[in-house]
Image (spheres, rainbow, N blue to C red):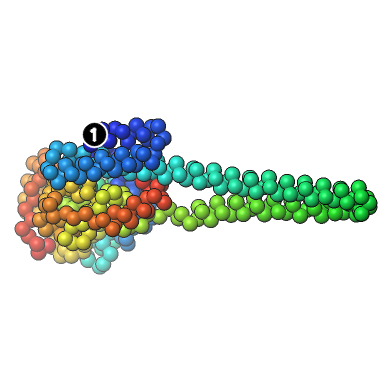
């Protein structure tokens, strides 16, 4: 558990964020095993949960940067292609003039038309790229839905567990609460660690939300 | 739990408080994440508290919200200590949800303010707790370490 914990930290430092996520999750899995066995590693659940969140955020940031680079790259490539096309058409017109099919004035007029047309197209490509970027930003309204938040820390849950009331908490924060008081936070009924059940569907949903919204870790 | 636990949660609470608060509750100051001051008003026509505003001091420990915040009424200009059978004249409040036993980490600054609002609203007795003078003169303990006796549920 400790080894994976340090491995994940090293991988973050080396910018291997995808591998760091896997290592942190492995440390978390081993820690939950300790929790069930009642081993002393159980007390590390807090820092390990935090590390999983941090790795996920780093990984999301890496993927986000890559995506933005790809998008700008694509816009630039399209522009280069457009200018090549323009050059080819211009040469075609010059050839026609050389063969005497166009006189001087007609050639100039055709060239002007060609220039305008491609200026317009290049502008459109740039505008589309900017619009796509804005649309992307707007789609991410940067609101964290309540269902993925832990009611104790107000952070996105990594390992939600559910109590009798149907309310889910992150394993790390409800354990911290149970250390102090063995009661359900909502009803104050007796609650033991053994009564907690993992909420697998919610866990998947939270992981899915974080994969798309890594910024939510720092929200 | 790692450091920054309380800070993170409080910064989220503060963001929400800056966004909106229920009627009768206003933030007076929140500098840092150790002490906040909020003003509360009773909204109905209870003659004991009508047209009066009271100031609450919240003190947070690094293990908030696992540990309860220390909440007391404080005096300032136009901010007296409300009269109530569970509020000592030095501002110390006897409310189970603020004690070690009654606190739950799903409570927050806003919900505590609302509970205190309704504690005042529902009160009709124009009196201080029994032994107020002695308590105020002799108590040196911190509010959270005092074992209040929560037997009287009628007020």
Q: Position of residue A127 (x, y in %)?
A: 64, 53
**In the figure, is residue B119 to the left or right of A134?**
left
Q: Residue furthest bottom?
A: B45
Position of the N terminus of chain B, as image quadrant, is top left
Q: Position of residue A142 (x, y in %)?
A: 43, 53
Disc 1 target residue = A2
Q: Is residue B129 visible?
A: yes
Nearest the viewer among B88 and A36 is A36
The residue at 8%/48% (across/down) is: B147
Quarter containing the C terminus of chain B: bottom left
How many labels, in total? 1
Picture quarter containing residue A37? top left
Judging depth in this view, the residue of B16 and A47 nearest the camera is A47
What percent of the width, then of the height, locates residue A196? 16, 54
Q: Please name the residue shown 40% across and 55% down the image.
A: A143
Q: Chain of mark 1?
A: A
**Residue under the image location 25 percent in, 68 percent down:** B45
Q: Residue at x 53, y 45 (%)?
A: A68
On the image, which quarter does residue A58 sit in?
A: top left
Secondary element under disc 1, as helix, strand or loop, is helix
Q: Is residue B67 visible?
A: no
Q: Residues within 10 Å of mark 1 (few under 14, many from 20)?
A: few
Q: Is residue B11 left or right of residue A140?
A: left
In the picture provided, is A6 more to the left or to the right than A69?
A: left
């Amino acid at each position: 558990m400790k080894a994976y914990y340090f491995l994940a930290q090293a991988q973050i430092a080396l910018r291997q964020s995808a591998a760091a996520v896997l290592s942190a999750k492995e440390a978390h899995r081993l820690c939950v095993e300790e929790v069930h066995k009642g081993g002393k590693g159980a007390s590390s659940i807090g820092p390990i949960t935090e590390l999983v969140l941090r790795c996920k955020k780093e990984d999301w940031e890496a993927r986000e940067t890559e995506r933005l680079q790809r998008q700008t790259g694509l816009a630039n490539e399209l522009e280069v292609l457009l200018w090549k096309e323009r050059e080819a058409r211009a040469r075609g017109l010059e050839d026609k003039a050389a063969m005497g099919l166009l006189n001087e004035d007609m050639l100039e007029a055709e060239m002007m038309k060609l220039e305008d047309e491609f200026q317009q197209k290049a502008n459109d490509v740039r505008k589309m790229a900017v619009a796509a970027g804005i649309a992307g930003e707007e789609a991410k309204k940067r609101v964290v839905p309540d269902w993925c938040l832990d009611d104790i820390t107000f952070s996105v849950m990594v390992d939600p567990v559910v109590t009798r009331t149907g309310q889910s908490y992150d394993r790390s924060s409800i354990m911290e609460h149970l250390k102090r008081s063995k009661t359900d936070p909502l009803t104050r009924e007796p609650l033991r660690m053994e009564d907690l059940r993992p909420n697998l569907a919610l866990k998947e949903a939270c992981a899915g939300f974080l994969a798309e919204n890594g910024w939510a870790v720092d929200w | 739990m790692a450091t920054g636990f309380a800070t993170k949660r409080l910064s989220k609470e503060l963001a929400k408080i800056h966004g909106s608060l229920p009627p009768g509750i206003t933030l007076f100051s929140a500098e840092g994440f150790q002490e906040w001051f909020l003003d509360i008003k009773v909204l109905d026509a209870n003659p004991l508290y009508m047209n009066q505003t009271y100031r609450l001091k919240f003190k947070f420990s690094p293990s908030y919200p696992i540990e309860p915040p220390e909440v007391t009424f404080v005096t300032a200009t136009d901010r007296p200590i409300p009269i109530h059978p569970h509020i000592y004249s030095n501002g110390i409040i006897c409310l189970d949800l603020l004690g070690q036993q009654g606190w739950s980490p799903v409570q927050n600054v806003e919900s505590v303010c609302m509970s205190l609002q309704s504690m005042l609203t529902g009160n009709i007795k124009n009196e201080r707790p029994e032994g107020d003078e002695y308590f105020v003169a002799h108590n040196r303990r911190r509010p959270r370490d005092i074992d209040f006796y929560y037997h009287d549920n009628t007020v």
